[in-house]
Structure formats: structure tokens, C-alpha cells
């Protein structure tokens, strides 16, 4: 059992380590060679540099303060829509999905090519702190967070692993035992598991750190520097090979790749294990106690310093001690199933009624492409529910009335309804309602309307054939020397826009007959904020229709290109490079 003094010291050291690691690793993030850092490259006027690794945990702290132990992925998603304006990688895709009305976990999987990356593993410390000494509870909370933007991917496994390891680190300082315990919380077939287990094996075999680095990259490496398996492994390497705090964080950061993430997690873990006395003043004094929040976190009542953050973490830890732990763990969302959205009809899911929505194929509808959707109604209450079902939609759509169902206590029934488009929908995203009418004594007792999103598809002509795509990412087929892809971009207003088209193949983008770029060397970085400069163009795009022509050469690399239209880098409100979700490809 942790006494209050020890708990305060460990949690404070955790957050201090997080700031130290983020500030050390941030300036060299993305460098994939072996580095030789010995000290901070930059400090802010308050000490620590702002970093999304901590920012998003302050958002989660706020959600815990507002919702308590019953926190859900939907609660976190709601806070993202209000406070988070990061365009980075998976954050950008998930935020676009949530702005269009998708709920977790579908918001974290749809059209998202970054589900295997580091955006969620870096958010583990808050769950470990409020569940200190309880890895299973920490892992359960971490799942709710990770599926918001990494559903079905290795990012989920990474956050679970880190949260479980750090939660146990409050009561255990045996590094190898911590790693083995955390590995038991994630699937053995996952690449996070394999990469970390391999690192531990190589340590036990007496391999050097640099030998281990090359072996991990050869088996589990990726050219995307944010790929979670390689980075999670590098984080544990620093702790395994490190002789003390300084040695561990320098070993970690100098392995390269997603350095702000790896070294921040390693430093936080060491802080948890050994407390503030383990962190040399050489590293802590320049950082100080202040918290610096990134500019793209908006309207968040964040703690002003590490002391306030630590005290609030302890308050939430004490709150969770008296919560129904088994009920929280039992309600853990699936970590692998990414194609659903859940709605509670009653306040208590354990003893109530909830609905699980699934898209059969893709979430779009067109005159020649129906959109079937299934709704599973689970009755956990103590009374039978007799219900009528139907879809309520805009005039562009049509759907026959759904089935009438009698659902006994403890049972579930499935309603499959198919949405049809009378005409091509006018809007890119369309709000549909699944209406449930509960009947009691042959009268209407209550009504529930569950909103969900159906998209107008992006329409392409690829090598002369029409094709629908649900999102930004387009997979090409065949071995033609080049693929010619055309569409009409409708821009509803005149505004400064960045057009991005990137692929591992050489790609040319023409707008209204003008070549905007012709990139000979392909590089696939399909993010809103960091696509290669050769594969993006900033311009004032006028309201109206524009012809887009993309020519992708077939050089044997990945048959995929990404086309999206975002704000320009100088737009700061609400956040730079956010996706224009009101534009249409038709």
C-alpha cells in the first residue's frame, strides 16, 4: 500500500520525468540515425517545451474530473472536439472523423493510416497515476483513450503496455518483471509484444544496445518514425541498458526515431520507480515546475504547475479506489474491434440497454451504392423491451421501416436497415437517426434517436473507370505504367487551401489544367501537417468547381495515394492544417 508521501513523490517524479524527456527529445523528433545528444537543445522561458505527450493527458485529466470513474471513449472524444486542434497524423484523421459525426472506436479507424503509431502510447501516465499499483485497471482506462484515434491498431497495444507497466512501477522496481507483467496485458501476436519481448531477449543474451537497435529495426522497423512497435521497444531499451537516470534518458534519445515519445515515457517510468531523488538536479532544475500547454489546445482549464497536477492525480486516484473496479474493467471496450459505435439508452450500461451500430461495408451512400447498417440492441435490464425501429434521414435518402422486436432480459436482437440514396447527397457528411420507439401496453412509452453519419462518396475516374472512395486514401490496382485519376473538387467558399497528394510513387497534380507539382521521388507521408513539400501546394482556392487530375507512376512501390485539402500553415484558429470537411469530390 502506498502512503500519501510516497505516492506524491512518485507521481510528481513521473510528471517531472515526462517534461524532462519531452524537452530533451522534442527537438530531434523524427531523426532516424543514431544520435549523440548530451543535453537539452532548447528550453522555453518556463523551462519545459510544450508537447502533445503531456497536453493530451491534461485533456484526459479534465475528462476524469468531469466524468469520474465512469469515463468512456465518447467522453474523451467530446473533449477532443472542444479542446484539441492538433492536425498531426492520427490526431488529424480522428479529429476529422469526429467532426463529421463518427464516434469511437470508428473515429479512430476510418480512413486512418496511422493506427499503428505513437499518438496514444504517449498518453499512459495519467492512467497509471490514477490506478497506481493496479495494472489491470490502468489498462482498462487506457483502452478507452487509445481507441479514440488508434482503434484496431498497434497504438492501442502500445498504450495498454505503457499504462500497465507504469501502474505496476508504483509498487515494483524490477525492470524485467515490469516488462514481463505488461507484456501479459497485450496479445502475443501483436508487433508491440514481439518487439518488446525481442528487446528483453537480446538484453538477456548480452547484446549491446546498438546491436539491439539494429536487430529490432531489421525485424520490426518501419520507415514511418512514429511506428509504435519500434519505439515502444526503444523506450524499454533505455531503461534496461541505462545505469542511472541520465544514462537511461541519453541512451533512449540517442536511439533516434520518435524521440520525444520514447524518452518522455522512459523518464516518467524511472520517476515512478524511484521518485524525485533519482532525478539529478542537473536535469530537473532547468525544467522547473511550470506546465506549458501547446497553442493548439484550446480553452482547457489545465493545472498551472506539476504540484497542482500531482495533487489532482492523487485526488482522482483516491476517487477510483472507491469506485466499482470490477464494473469498470468489465465495461472495457474491445481493443481489436474497430468497426462499431455504441450508444447507451439507459444511464447504467451494466443493467441497462445499449445499441451497437456497425457499417457493413463503408459509411457512404450513393444512388448506385446502398449503405446497409446493423444495430444490435442488448437488453441488460430486468424487463422485456418491445420496440419499433426506423431510420430518419434527409430528403436525399430513403429507407423502409425496420423490424419490430421483442427483447427479453439478458437477450439481444439485431435490426439491419439499408439506407438508399434517391439522388447523390448534396452534403459530404449526412446525419441519419436510428429511431427506437418503445411500446408499453400498446402505447408509445419512450423514443430514442441515435445519430450516425453517412457520407457522400468521393467520386474518382481512375484509368477511365468511375470509382467511389470513402476517404482520402485511394488504393490503386493493376500494373499499368501510370494511373490517371480525375475528379471534380467543389469548394463551397473562397479560402486559402493546401492541396496534398502524396504517394511512394512519383506523382503529378494538375488543377484546372495547371501543374501544381510534379514530384519525381515518391514518399508517402499522408499527414495533414507533414506531407513532403514536393507533394503539396498552397493557394487561394476560389469558390466553385475545379478539375483535379492526378497522375501516379507505377514504380513498384505501395499502390496508394492520399489526396486531401486542408487549411494553410498560417491559419492558427482553431488550429493549423485542419481538414476542410465541407469540400466535395464529385
Image (cartoon, rainbow, N blue to C red):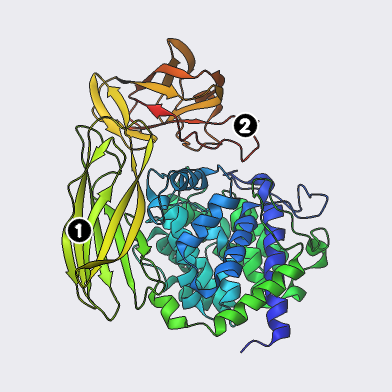
Q: Which mark is residue 562?
A: none
Tell me: residue 12, above or below residue 257: below
Picture residue at 40% right of the left edge, 49% below the top: 102
Locate residue 545, reporting x and y percent: 42, 18
Q: Is residue 101 left or right of residue 256?
A: left
Locate residue 320, reporting x and y percent: 55, 80
User: Is residue 158 visible to us here?
Assistant: no
The one of 176 and 522 positioned closer to us in this rendering: 522
Q: Quadrant of residue 317?
A: bottom right
Question: Local crowd at mark 2 within 10 Å, few (<14), some, or many (≥20)?
Answer: some
Lower sequence index among marks 1 and 2: 1
- What residue would you read off at disc 2? 569
Picture residue at 76% right of the left edge, 53% below the top: 39
Question: Local crowd at mark 1 within 10 Å, few (<14), some, or many (≥20)?
Answer: some
Picture residue at 64% right of the left edge, 61% below the top: 58
- What residue would you read off at disc 1? 415
User: Is residue 30 visible to us here?
Assistant: yes
SS class of the residue under badge 2?
loop
The one of 357 and 523 positioned closer to us in this rendering: 357
Amino acid at each position: 500500500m502506498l502512503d500519501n508521501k510516497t505516492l506524491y513523490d512518485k507521481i510528481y517524479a513521473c510528471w517531472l520525468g515526462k517534461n524532462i524527456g519531452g524537452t530533451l527529445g522534442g527537438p530531434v523528433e523524427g531523426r532516424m540515425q543514431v544520435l549523440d545528444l548530451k543535453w537539452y537543445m532548447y528550453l522555453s522561458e518556463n523551462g519545459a517545451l510544450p508537447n502533445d505527450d503531456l497536453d493530451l493527458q491534461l485533456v484526459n485529466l479534465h475528462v476524469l474530473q468531469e466524468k469520474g470513474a465512469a469515463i468512456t471513449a465518447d467522453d474523451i472524444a467530446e473533449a477532443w472536439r472542444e479542446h484539441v486542434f492538433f492536425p498531426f497524423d492520427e490526431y488529424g484523421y480522428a479529429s476529422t472523423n469526429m467532426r463529421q459525426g463518427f464516434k469511437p472506436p470508428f473515429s479512430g479507424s476510418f480512413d486512418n493510416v496511422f493506427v499503428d503509431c505513437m499518438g496514444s502510447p504517449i498518453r499512459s501516465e495519467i492512467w497509471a497515476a490514477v490506478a497506481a499499483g493496479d495494472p489491470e485497471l490502468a489498462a482498462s482506462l487506457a483502452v478507452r483513450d487509445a481507441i479514440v484515434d488508434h482503434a484496431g491498431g498497434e497504438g492501442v497495444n502500445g498504450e495498454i503496455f505503457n499504462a500497465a507497466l507504469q501502474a505496476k512501477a508504483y509498487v515494483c522496481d524490477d525492470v524485467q518483471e515490469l516488462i514481463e507483467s505488461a507484456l501479459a496485458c497485450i496479445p502475443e501476436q501483436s508487433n508491440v509484444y514481439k518487439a518488446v519481448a525481442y528487446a528483453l531477449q537480446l538484453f538477456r543474451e548480452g547484446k549491446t544496445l546498438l546491436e539491439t537497435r539494429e536487430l529490432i529495426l531489421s525485424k520490426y522497423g518501419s520507415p514511418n518514425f512514429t511506428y509504435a512497435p519500434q519505439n515502444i521497444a526503444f523506450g524499454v531499451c533505455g531503461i534496461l541498458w541505462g545505469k542511472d537516470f541520465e544514462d537511461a534518458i541519453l541512451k533512449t534519445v540517442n536511439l533516434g526515431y520518435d524521440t520525444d515519445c520514447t524518452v518522455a515515457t522512459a523518464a516518467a517510468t524511472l520517476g515512478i520507480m524511484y521518485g524525485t531523488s533519482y532525478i539529478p538536479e542537473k536535469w530537473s532544475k532547468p525544467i522547473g515546475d511550470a506546465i506549458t500547454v501547446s497553442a493548439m489546445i484550446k480553452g482547457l482549464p489545465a493545472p498551472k504547475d506539476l504540484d497542482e497536477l500531482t495533487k489532482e492525480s492523487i485526488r482522482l486516484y483516491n476517487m477510483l479506489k472507491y469506485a466499482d473496479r470490477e464494473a469498470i474493467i468489465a465495461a472495457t471496450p474491445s481493443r481489436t474491434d474497430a468497426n462499431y459505435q455504441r450508444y447507451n439508452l439507459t444511464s447504467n450500461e451494466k443493467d441497462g440497454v445499449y445499441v451497437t451500430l456497425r457499417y457493413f461495408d463503408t459509411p457512404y451512400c450513393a444512388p448506385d451504392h446502398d449503405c446497409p447498417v446493423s444495430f444490435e440492441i442488448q437488453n441488460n435490464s430486468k424487463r422485456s423491451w418491445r420496440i419499433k425501429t426506423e431510420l430518419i434521414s434527409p430528403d436525399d435518402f430513403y429507407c423502409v421501416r425496420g423490424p419490430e422486436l421483442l427483447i427479453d432480459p439478458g437477450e439481444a436482437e439485431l435490426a439491419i436497415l439499408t439506407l438508399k440514396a434517391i439522388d447523390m447527397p448534396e452534403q459530404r457528411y449526412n446525419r441519419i437517426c436510428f429511431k427506437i420507439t418503445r411500446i408499453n401496453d400498446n402505447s408509445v412509452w419512450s423514443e430514442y434517436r441515435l445519430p450516425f453519419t453517412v457520407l457522400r462518396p468521393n467520386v474518382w475516374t481512375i484509368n477511365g473507370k468511375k470509382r467511389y472512395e470513402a476517404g482520402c486514401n485511394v488504393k490503386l490496382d493493376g500494373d499499368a505504367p501510370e494511373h490517371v485519376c480525375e475528379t471534380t473538387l467543389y469548394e463551397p467558399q473562397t479560402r486559402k487551401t493546401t492541396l496534398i497528394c502524396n504517394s511512394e510513387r512519383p506523382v503529378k497534380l494538375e488543377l484546372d489544367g495547371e501543374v501544381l507539382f510534379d514530384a519525381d521521388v515518391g514518399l508517402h507521408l499522408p499527414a495533414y501537417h507533414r506531407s513532403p513539400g514536393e507533394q503539396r501546394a498552397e493557394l487561394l482556392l476560389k469558390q466553385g468547381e475545379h478539375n483535379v487530375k492526378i497522375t501516379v507512376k507505377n514504380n513498384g512501390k505501395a499502390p496508394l495515394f492520399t489526396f486531401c485539402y486542408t487549411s494553410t500553415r498560417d491559419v492558427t484558429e482553431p488550429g493549423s492544417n485542419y481538414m476542410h470537411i465541407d469540400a466535395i469530390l464529385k
